[in-house]
Image (spheres, grey):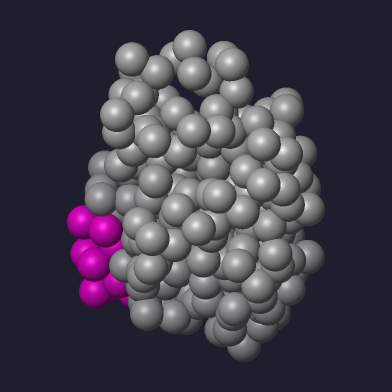
């Protein structure tokens, strides 16, 4: 198969598996999504979803978050890991949103990526899921599967994002990136993927990927 044919196969199969793609992180607006995504770095969505209700009961707007101390935020989010860095980032970005953006989350990649603790992937998630802007956030699952399927060389996430945007129609990006993540979690784990479960890799995987299948 050519890359274009592989991409079309992926689109069709993932639409069968995941016709609905709810955002896995609990949130109700752009700010709560931003905080949840920031917390999800090196932490499972499941754990984040246990912590954010506690945090958001105390503060669900930047104006409220800056009334907490960094130490209070850190104590709440500690189970998510990297708590010192994340708590400082949450406090600092909440100040910036309050002072510079009237308490609103800005709707641009540039403004988001200037916020403390917010990288390109976090900005992409917020732009796509909160504001509906076409984006293709690449996490470890997408990077792994795009490489396994021979759709990118897999050198780095930046290159994987560029290749994904070339191969897949823009109008599918926001849904498809979630579909690939869901497939990676349920069918194609990093270690010991199973041939009878990871059927997309079994069909279109690279030689190295096929050798990985048990």
| 213 in magenta | no
Residue 165 image position (x, y, % from top left)? 73, 55
Q: 28 or 211, which is in the foreground?
A: 211
Residue 208 image position (x, y, % from top left)? 57, 14
Picture residue at 55% right of the left edge, 33% below the top: 204
Q: Which residues, given as a range, are shown in magenta?
A: 49-59
Is the residue 183 above or below the residue 56 in the image?
above
Picture residue at 77% right of the left edge, 47% below the top: 162
Give the image quarter of residue 50: bottom left
Picture residue at 70% right of the left edge, 67% below the top: 170
Q: Overall secondary structure of the magenta stretch?
A: helix
- State how many labels appear: 0
Horizontal placement of 18 versus 101: left or right? Answer: left
Tell me the quadrant of the picture where the C terminus can be found.
top left
Picture residue at 32% right of the left edge, 67% below the top: 26
Residue 192 image position (x, y, % from top left)? 34, 18
Residue at the outermost front position? 1
Q: 193 or 71, which is in the foreground?
A: 193
| 52 in magenta | yes
Q: Is residue 209 visible?
A: yes
Is the residue 204 above or below the residue 52 in the image?
above
Give the image quarter of residue 110: bottom right
Is the residue 128 above or below the residue 78 in the image?
below
Q: 115 or 66, which is in the foreground?
A: 115
Tell me the quadrant of the picture where the N terminus can be found.
top right
Residue 140 image position (x, y, % from top left)? 52, 37
Horizontal placement of 65 versus 206: left or right? Answer: left
Q: Is residue 161 visible?
A: no
């Amino acid at each position: 198969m050519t890359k274009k044919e592989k991409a079309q196969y992926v689109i069709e199969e993932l639409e069968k598996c995941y016709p609905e793609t709810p955002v896995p992180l609990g949130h109700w607006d752009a700010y709560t999504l931003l905080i949840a995504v920031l917390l999800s770095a090196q932490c499972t969505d499941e754990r984040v979803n246990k912590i954010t209700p506690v945090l958001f009961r105390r503060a669900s707007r930047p104006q409220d978050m800056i009334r907490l101390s960094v130490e209070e935020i850190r104590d709440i989010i500690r189970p998510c890991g990297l708590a010192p860095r994340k708590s400082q980032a949450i406090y600092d970005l909440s100040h910036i949103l309050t002072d510079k953006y009237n308490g609103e989350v800005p709707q641009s990649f540039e403004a988001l990526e200037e916020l403390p603790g917010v990288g390109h992937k976090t900005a992409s998630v917020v732009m796509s899921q909160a504001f509906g802007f076409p984006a293709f956030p690449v996490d470890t699952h997408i990077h792994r599967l795009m490489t396994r399927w021979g759709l990118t060389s897999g050198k780095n996430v930046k290159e994987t994002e560029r290749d994904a945007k070339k191969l897949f129609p823009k109008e599918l990006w926001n849904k498809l990136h979630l579909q690939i993540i869901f497939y990676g979690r349920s069918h194609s784990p990093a270690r010991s993927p199973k041939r009878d479960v990871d059927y997309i890799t079994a069909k279109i995987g690279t030689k190295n990927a096929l050798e990985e299948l048990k």
